Amino acid sequence: MVRLAATALAASLLAAPALAEPVAYTVDKSHSSIFFSVEHLGFSTIHGHFGAYDADIVLDEDDLANSKANVTIDMSSLDTFWEPRTEHLKTADFFDVEKFPQATFVSRTFKKTGENKVAVTGDLSIHGKTKEVTIDFTVKKVGQNPMAKVKAIGLVGTTVLKRSDYNVAGYAPAVADEVPLRIDLELDQKQ
């Protein structure tokens, strides 16, 4: 009887479907963006984005703890849609992109926080300073990308950064310290 039970257990384990492995994704840059906004004197909100970035993203849908994201942003790709302001933000008054050409985000944890909600916590380095940040993502859609013929995931992430945390506090309080960040991602499974 014991032998029969052991054989049945072994057979059931072998027949059980294997858990999915972590999957690497690429960012479809033609359908993704990193946007920020900042208040100016309380009168207006200035919007901008970073146009050049690279990301290594691995997602494990069965165990988010095995997921990871490493992102590098080219700070010279900053654009606020008005060239004089954009060029000023690249100077030592703000981001000093000659001295600090990149910003990086390295994830530490992925945590499900609700239906279609994931919090990604990691270290964000800007202007030579590193701070822990949490980006709250909403999963918009998971499915087959009919054009790329691969699995795709659509996500929207938000967080609020403080310029003063990164020594980029020039012209405060005329330019607000808090900077909302929005990340729209379309991820395609690597082939």
Image: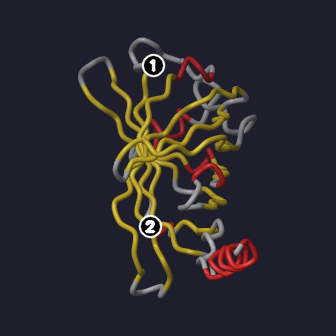
- Residue extending farthest left: 43
Where is 20 relative to 127, above or below? below
Quadrant that contains the C terminus:
bottom right
Say what amino acid the circle numbered 1 marks. Asp
From the viewer's side, name the closer residue of 52 and 185.
185
Q: Determine which residue is flagged by label 1.
A: 177
**Dot 1, how many residues are within 10 Å of its Cα: few (below 14), some (14-19), or many (20+)?**
many
Residue 185 image offset from top left, x and y in percent: 45, 59
Where is 166 relative to 109, above or below? above
Is residue 175 something one can see in this rendering?
Answer: yes
Residue 117 image offset from top left, x and y in percent: 39, 48
Residue 94 image offset from top left, x and y in percent: 58, 27
Is residue 35 something one can see in this rendering?
Answer: no
**Dot 2, how many residues are within 10 Å of its Cα: few (below 14), some (14-19), or many (20+)?**
some
Say what amino acid the circle numbered 2 marks. Ile
On screen, residue 81 versus residue 166, left or right, reads left
Where is 99 relative to 152, above or below? above
The secondary structure type at the circle numbered 1 is: loop
- Residue extending farthest top: 173
Instruction: Write the residue at 75% across / 35% down.
Output: 99
From the viewer's side, name the closer residue of 18 and 186.
18
Q: Determine which residue is flagged by label 2.
A: 153
Quadrant that contains the N terminus:
bottom right
From the viewer's side, name the closer residue of 189 and 67.
67
Instruction: Write the residue at 62% across / 20% down.
Output: 167
Do the CB atoms of the residues marked 2 and 1 lie less than 8 Å apart? no
The secondary structure type at the circle numbered 2 is: strand
On screen, residue 39 versus residue 151, left or right, reads left
Residue 107 image offset from top left, x and y in percent: 64, 44
